[in-house]
Image (cartoon, grey):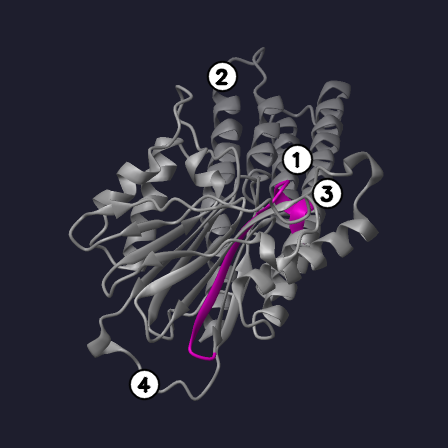
Amino acid sequence: MEAGHGLAGVRQPWQSSHALLVIPIVLIVVITAVDQLVPADIHLGPLLVIAPAITASFAGPRLTGLIGFLAVAAQAYIGWHFGVLFSRNVLVQVLALTVLSAMIVFGCVVRERSRHQLAQVRSVAEAAQHVLLWPLPERIGALRIACLYLAAEDEAQIGGDLYAATRIMGGVRIMIGDVRGKGLSAIGEAALLLGAFREAAHRHTSLPDLAASLEQSVTRYLADFEPVEETGERFATTLLLELPDDDHITRVVSCGHPPPLVLSPDGGLTVPSLHPAPPLGIGEIGPEEYKIDVLSFEPGDTLLLYTDGVIEARDAGGDFYPFETRAAQWSEAGPDSLLHHIQRDLRAYTRGRLDDDAALVALRREPDIHRRRHHRHITHASGFGGSS
């Protein structure tokens, strides 16, 4: 199936190039014919160079070379038709057209080589992105989950915005974070934080212990790899959540990260007031410094997590995106539909240009009657994108 799609993708540009070849061929024929009809002191032959130049815009070096050869042949035919093929003027025109066509073909060769190298780089980048950017499962425990990453940088799909979810005994733990910096420069810290969360989420019984463990991991990393000129300037805001299966609450520990939004099916929206600790990497602190906030999270509610790239997005006039107001409009939508609405609305608000990467995770607690009873296997997933 995939091979068939691949062949179709190759065949389509090839067929398109052949169809467009009609344009330069017709152009050569028209110029050659008209040149024989106009007065003798008017020479249209030099216009033949337009044909290979046009061909280079949609075809490779071989087809461009073929059109160039036809253009040179047409120029020679015009000279032969008027009996001046071996005159100095016609020979110079033929030579000039040959040189120009060769230069155009050379440009095609350079372009195709650059395209091939770019394709190789993109394939390597995509492989890395698939390894690092693990999609969250659609369902985990009693939750339906959807995630979204919007890149500020062209071609970037990973960076310092991150999210992760893992099944633990009796519940689910989720992390969303934002490493200072954006794009590829923040990948190292994001990868470290994700790896630390995957390992520590199962070893620590409380969220404060988990937060302290992540702080230690980030501090060790920065001690080894933080540039001297950026000492104290690299950190990560993080939100840690624990959603038990047997209680309709959410335990939250904030490390300098924006609070989540709680959307009710009736259109209500709640922005909880949290007690944030400093971001990870600012200064190592113990578990006792992390405050647990408990939020109500009833069946049917949606918990919306996000990074500051969403709330700091601006329109052409410099006004911030009204995230809370817009999100409340789609409180009845499921996680996937909710993020789809936000993505479309945010792109329209910013005219398709974000100043910072943005990540969102939507969680909906299913009604008790729909809960899945079979949790024999522990599921685990995580991913990250770009950051501030």
Q: List the residue tagged with mark 2.
A: 38
Inspect the image, locate mark 2, and give the three-letter code of the amino acid beneath it: Val
Q: Based on the displayed image, in which of its 4 quarters is residue 70 positioned?
A: top right
Q: Nearer the viewer, residue 377 or 249?
A: 249
Give residue 128's position: percent from left, percent from top: 64, 61
In space, the residues marked 4 and 2 are separated at their CA atoms by 87 Å
| Precedes in sequence: disc 3 or disc 2 | 2
Q: Secondary structure at mark 4?
A: loop
Pick whichever of labels 1 and 3 is earlier in the sequence.
1
Q: CA distance from mark 1 to mark 3?
A: 22 Å
Q: Secondary structure at mark 3?
A: helix
Residue 162 image position (x, y, % from top left): 55, 54
Quarter location, residue 376: bottom left
Q: Which residue is mark 3?
A: 110
Q: Report the quarter where the N terminus lies.
A: bottom left
Residue 310 appears anywhere in the view:
yes
Q: Which residues are magenta?
A: 169-187
Q: Which mark is residue 373?
A: 4
**Magenta stretch: residue 175 in it?**
yes
The tag on residue 72 is 1
